[in-house]
C-alpha cells in the first residue's frame, strides 16, 4: 500500500502486557501511529517492550503517557481500570479517543461513569477475541489479532468518527470488527468464554482434589488436555472477570447446572434416549456453529477451493453403477421422517446443502437424528405434533426449498420460530409462500420485500383453502400441502403447469393420503404419518450425464441402478429416446411412493430433433448435457420454450453456447432456446463453467468424443451436487483428473 498518514499520531497504551503489547506491536508494524508510548506499573516490562521493539517510548507515569496522546488504550486488568482512569484524567486531551481491551464491558462503562460522571462520546469500549494463557509483554505478538474478531460496544451517543477510526485501527491490525451493545457483549461472553473457563478451572481442581498425588493426570488423554488448556489462564485476570460480569455469568451458570443435573438424572435412570438426543444435538450444533457464525452456506468446504477438470480425449463407457441419491427426496425424507410416528431409516441419503440444513433444523426442534453415515440416516420421529420450540433461529444455509417448506410446516406449530439463511438466501423472495399461508390464517413477518428472515407466530389455527398458484412452483405447492396437514378441512393447490410431485408421493409413502385430480393436489388436515424405510432413488439428474455419455461413446454398455423415474423428471430419457437413444428400463418398482428402475444404456446413432416443448419442464436441469448429445447427432436439434434455463445457477444457454464455442462447436442462441447443428466435432480447449456444476460435468462427458484435451475451470461445486463424480466418471472410462488449487 502507498504511504498514507498514520491514523493516530500518539497512541498511549496503559498496561503493557500480552494484549497491550500485542496491540502496540501491531500498530507499529502496520504504521498505524507515528508514536506508540506505554505506561505500566512494572518498569521491567516497559524495558522489555522497548527491547523487543513493541513500543517507541516508555513513559514514566500514566499521566506522562497520555499527555498529547490522541488515542488512549487501557490494557490493564478490568478491576484496575477505575484507578487508572483517575490517574490519567488530569492530563488527558479532551478530544482523545479512549478505548479498552477488557473482557467485560459493563464494568468498563461503570468505571468510566464513576470517574467522569458520564460516558464521553469519544469513549468506545472494545474487546479483542484473541489471546492466550500466557501473560506479560514477552508473550506479545504483532499478529495476535490477525483473522480474529474484535467486538466494539459503542454507547448510543458515541461519536461516529471515533468509532470509524477505532474500527480502521483494528482492521489495520488484521482483525474483523463487530459492534454490539454492552449488555449483549457481556451475555455472549459469559456463555462462550467465561463459563468454559469456570468449568475448566473447576474440573481440574476437582480432579486434583480427588487424588492427592495428581496421579490421575498421568492417565489423562489428549481430550482432557484440550478441554482443560484454558485452566492455565491467569487466575488474577479471571477472578476479575467473574467479579465484573457477575449477573450474566450467574445466569448462564444456573442454566448449565440445570442441564447438567438433567444429564445426571438421565444416567441415573438409564435414560439412553435422552443422552443420545442431547449428545447428537450437541455434536451437530458444534459442527453447525462455525457455519452459522460465518453466515456461510451449509456446505462450503469445496467452494473455497479452485477445482479444475483436466480431460483427455476419448475413453470408454462401461460398468454397473449407482449415482448419488436424489436431492429433493433426501430432503423430504428427513422432513416427513421427523414428523412420523416411529423410526424412519433412510439409505442413499445425499449429504447436500439442503438436506443437511434441514436435518440440523429438526435437531434444533428436538428430533433425534443419527447419521448421516455413508448415506444412512436414522430418524427418531416425534409424531406430527411432537416438535419442540427451537432455542434460537433456524438457520437454513442456502436452502430456498428448505425455507419455503419449513414456512408451511412451522406456520402450524404451537411455538414461534424464526427462519434465517446465508446472504444469498436472504435476498430471495418468500412472499410467494407467506401470502397464501396468511390466507390459511398464518401470522408471518418478513423483512422488506418479503425476504428472510421469516418470523412465524405460533399457536395460530389454520384453515384449509383452495389455492390457484399464479406460477408453477413445486416449492409453493409443497409448502401449502405441509401446512394443510395441520389445517382444519381440506387444502388444495392447483398448478398452472406440471411441477415436481415428490412431496405428494412421499406423503403417500408415509401413509398420508393425498388426493390428486389433474392439476390439483389436496390433503385433509388431522392425519398422521407412519415411519418407513426409504432407499433414496439415485438422482436422475446425475444419471443423465451417464445416459448421454453411454449414448455417444462407441462400444458403450452401462447399467445405472435404482434410478428415480418420477414422470415429472424423466424428460432426459424421453428426449434421448426421441433422438434414437438405446435406453432400456427394467426391474421397475416403487420406493417411498416414488417409481424407480434400473437402466441399461448402449451407444446408438443419435439424430437431431425439434425438442417437444412439453418435455422441457421435465428435463430442465438436463439440457446442458443434452446439448452435448445434440452436437454429435445427425442433423439439427432445436430447443424452444426454455426461457427458465437462462435464470438457473448460470444463464445455462449462454454459458453452454460459450463453452461449446470454446471447443469449436457452432450454435445459435435464441431468446428461449438454442439451435445446435449436429455432426460437429469437438476440438480441445478451455471451458469456464462459471461455477455451474452441470456445465462442468457436461464437458467431462463431451471429452469422450473430443479430439483434443479439454480443461474445465471452476468445478468445485460438482462435489456438492454429485459427490464422487470424478471417481465414478474415471471408473466408467472418462479420462478425467481433478486438480485442486
Ligand atoms: P497481562 O499480560 O497481565 O497485562 C496486564 C498489564 O497491566 C501487566 O503488565 C500489569 O502489571 C499491568 N497492570 C495491572 N494493573 C495495573 C495498574 N493499576 N496500572 C498500570 N499497569 C497495571 O494481561 P493481559 O492478558 O494483557 O490482559 C489485559 C486486559 O486484556 C485485561 O483486561 C483482560 O481482560 C483483557 N483480555 C485478555 C485476553 C487474554 O487472553 N489474555 C484476551 C482478551 C482481553 P502486573 O504484571 O504488575 O500486574
Image (tube, rainbow, N blue to C red):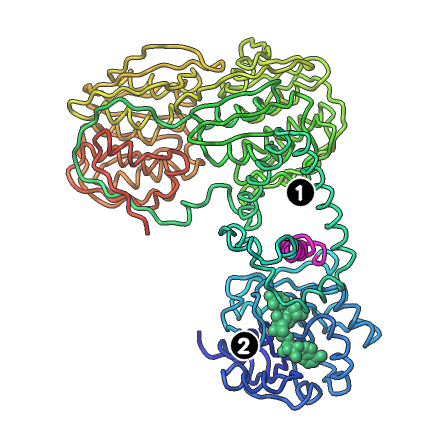
Magenta segment range? 185-204
Between 258 and 451, the one lying in front of the other is 258
Q: Taking 200 as reference, is 311 above or below it? A: above
Is 60 placed left or right of 117 in the picture?
Answer: left
How dense is the environment of label 1, judged by Cα within 10 Å: few (below 14), some, or many (20 and up)?
Answer: some
Whether label 2 touches label 1, CB < 8 Å:
no
Between 263 and 352, the one lying in front of the other is 263
Give the mark nearest the N terminus, 2 or 1.
2
Between 407 and 390, the one lying in front of the other is 390
Residue drawn at (40%, 30%), measured in percent from left and top? Answer: 672
Query: Is residue 208 in sight in this rendering?
Result: yes
Q: Taking 165 as reference, is 531 above or below it? A: above
Is 622 placed left or right of 456 in the picture?
Answer: left
Residue at the right extreme?
Answer: 117
Is 194 placed left or right of 507 in the picture?
Answer: right
Q: CA distance from mark 2 to mark 1?
A: 40 Å
In the rendered image, which residue does mark 2 sit on? Answer: 27
Q: Quadrant of residue 480?
A: top right
Q: What kind of element bears circle 2? A: helix
Mark 2 C-beta closer than 8 Å to ligand 1: no
Residue 226 in the image: state x and y as whole percent: 53, 54
Residue 580 in the image: state x and y as whole percent: 24, 16
Q: Quadrant of residue 680?
A: top left
Q: Taking 148 as reference, is 726 above or below it? A: above
In the rendered image, which residue does mark 1 sit on? Answer: 447
Residue drawn at (53%, 14%), measured in percent from left and top? Answer: 509
Q: Which mark is residue 207?
A: none
Question: Which of the four quarters of the rendered structure image does ligand 1 lie in?
Answer: bottom right
Amino acid at each position: 500500500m502507498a504511504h498514507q498518514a498514520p491514523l493516530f499520531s500518539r497512541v498511549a497504551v496503559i498496561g503493557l502486557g500480552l494484549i497491550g503489547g500485542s496491540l502496540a506491536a501491531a500498530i507499529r508494524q502496520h504504521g498505524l501511529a507515528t508514536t506508540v508510548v506505554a505506561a505500566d506499573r512494572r518498569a521491567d516490562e516497559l524495558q522489555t517492550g522497548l527491547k523487543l521493539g513493541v513500543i517507541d517510548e516508555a513513559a514514566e507515569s500514566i499521566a506522562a503517557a497520555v499527555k498529547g496522546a490522541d488515542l488512549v488504550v487501557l490494557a490493564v486488568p478490568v478491576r484496575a481500570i477505575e484507578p487508572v482512569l483517575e490517574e490519567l484524567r488530569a492530563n488527558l486531551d479532551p478530544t482523545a479517543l479512549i478505548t479498552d481491551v477488557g473482557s467485560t464491558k459493563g464494568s468498563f462503562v461503570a468505571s468510566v461513569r464513576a470517574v467522569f460522571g458520564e460516558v464521553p462520546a469519544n469513549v468506545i469500549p472494545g474487546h479483542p477475541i484473541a489471546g492466550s494463557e500466557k501473560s506479560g509483554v514477552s508473550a506479545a505478538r504483532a499478529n495476535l489479532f490477525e483473522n480474529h474478531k474484535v467486538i466494539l460496544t459503542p454507547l448510543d451517543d458515541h461519536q461516529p468518527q471515533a468509532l470509524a477510526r477505532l474500527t480502521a485501527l483494528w482492521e489495520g491490525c488484521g482483525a474483523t470488527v463487530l459492534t454490539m451493545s454492552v449488555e449483549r457483549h457481556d451475555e455472549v461472553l459469559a456463555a462462550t468464554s467465561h463459563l468454559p473457563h469456570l468449568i475448566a478451572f473447576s474440573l481440574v481442581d476437582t480432579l486434583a482434589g480427588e487424588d492427592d498425588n495428581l496421579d490421575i493426570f498421568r492417565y489423562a488423554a489428549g481430550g482432557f488436555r484440550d478441554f482443560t488448556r484454558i485452566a492455565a489462564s491467569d487466575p488474577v485476570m479471571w477472578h476479575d472477570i467473574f467479579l465484573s460480569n457477575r449477573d450474566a455469568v450467574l445466569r448462564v451458570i444456573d442454566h448449565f447446572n440445570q442441564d447438567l443435573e438433567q444429564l445426571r438424572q438421565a444416567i441415573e435412570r438409564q435414560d439412553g434416549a435422552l443422552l443420545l438426543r442431547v449428545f447428537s444435538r450437541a455434536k451437530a450444533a458444534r459442527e453447525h456453529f462455525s457455519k452459522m457464525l460465518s453466515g456461510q452456506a451449509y456446505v462450503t468446504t469445496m467452494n473455497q477451493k479452485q477445482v479444475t477438470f483436466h480431460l483427455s480425449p476419448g475413453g470408454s463407457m462401461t460398468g454397473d453403477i449407482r449415482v448419488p441419491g436424489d436431492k429433493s427426496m433426501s430432503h423430504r425424507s428427513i422432513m416427513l421422517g421427523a414428523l412420523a410416528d416411529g423410526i424412519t431409516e433412510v439409505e442413499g441419503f445425499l449429504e447436500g446443502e439442503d438436506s443437511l440444513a434441514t436435518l440440523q433444523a429438526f435437531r434444533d426442534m428436538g428430533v433425534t437424528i443419527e447419521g448421516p453415515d455413508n448415506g444412512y440416516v436414522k430418524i427418531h420421529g416425534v409424531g406430527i405434533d411432537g416438535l419442540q420450540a427451537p432455542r434460537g433461529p433456524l438457520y437454513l444455509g442456502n436452502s430456498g426449498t428448505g425455507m419455503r417448506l419449513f414456512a408451511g410446516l412451522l406456520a402450524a406449530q404451537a411455538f414461534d420460530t424464526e427462519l434465517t439463511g446465508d446472504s444469498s438466501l436472504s435476498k430471495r423472495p418468500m412472499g410467494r409462500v407467506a401470502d397464501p399461508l396468511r390466507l390459511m390464517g398464518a401470522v408471518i413477518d418478513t423483512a422488506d420485500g418479503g425476504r428472510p428472515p421469516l418470523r412465524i407466530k405460533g399457536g395460530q389455527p389454520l384453515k384449509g383453502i383452495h389455492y390457484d398458484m399464479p406460477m408453477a412452483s413445486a416449492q409453493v405447492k409443497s409448502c401449502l400441502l405441509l401446512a394443510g396437514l395441520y389445517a382444519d378441512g381440506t387444502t388444495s393447490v392447483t398448478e398452472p403447469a406440471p411441477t415436481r410431485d415428490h412431496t405428494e408421493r412421499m406423503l403417500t409413502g408415509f401413509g398420508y393420503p393425498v388426493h390428486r385430480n389433474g392439476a390439483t393436489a389436496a390433503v385433509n388436515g388431522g392425519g398422521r404419518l407412519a415411519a418407513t424405510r426409504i432407499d433414496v432413488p439415485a438422482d436422475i439428474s446425475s444419471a443423465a450425464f451417464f445416459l448421454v455419455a453411454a449414448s455417444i461413446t462407441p462400444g458403450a454398455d452401462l447399467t445405472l441402478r435404482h434410478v428415480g423415474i418420477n414422470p415429472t423428471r424423466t424428460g432426459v430419457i424421453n428426449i434421448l429416446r426421441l433422438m434414437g437413444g438405446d435406453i432400456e428400463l427394467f426391474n421397475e418398482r416403487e420406493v417411498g411412493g416414488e417409481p424407480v428402475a434400473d437402466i441399461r444404456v448402449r451407444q446408438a446413432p443419435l439424430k437431431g430433433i425439434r425438442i417437444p416443448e412439453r418435455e422441457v419442464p421435465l428435463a430442465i436441469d438436463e439440457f446442458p448435457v443434452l446439448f452435448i448429445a445434440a452436437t454429435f447427432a445427425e442433423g439439427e436439434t432445436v430447443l424452444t420454450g426454455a426461457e427458465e434455463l437462462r435464470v438457473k445457477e448460470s444463464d445455462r444457454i449462454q454459458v453452454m453456447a460459450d463453452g461449446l464455442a470454446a471447443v469449436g462447436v457452432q450454435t445459435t442462441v435464441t431468446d428461449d432456446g438454442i439451435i445446435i447443428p449436429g455432426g460437429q466435432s469437438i476440438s480441445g480447449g478451455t471451458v469456464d463453467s462459471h461455477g455451474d456444476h452441470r456445465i462442468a460435468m457436461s464437458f467431462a462427458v463431451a471429452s469422450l468424443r473430443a479430439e483434443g484435451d479439454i480443461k474445465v475451470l471452476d468445478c468445485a461445486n460438482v462435489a456438492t451436487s454429485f459427490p464422487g463424480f470424478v471417481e465414478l466418471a474415471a471408473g466408467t472410462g472418462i479420462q478425467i483428473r481433478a486438480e485442486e488449487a
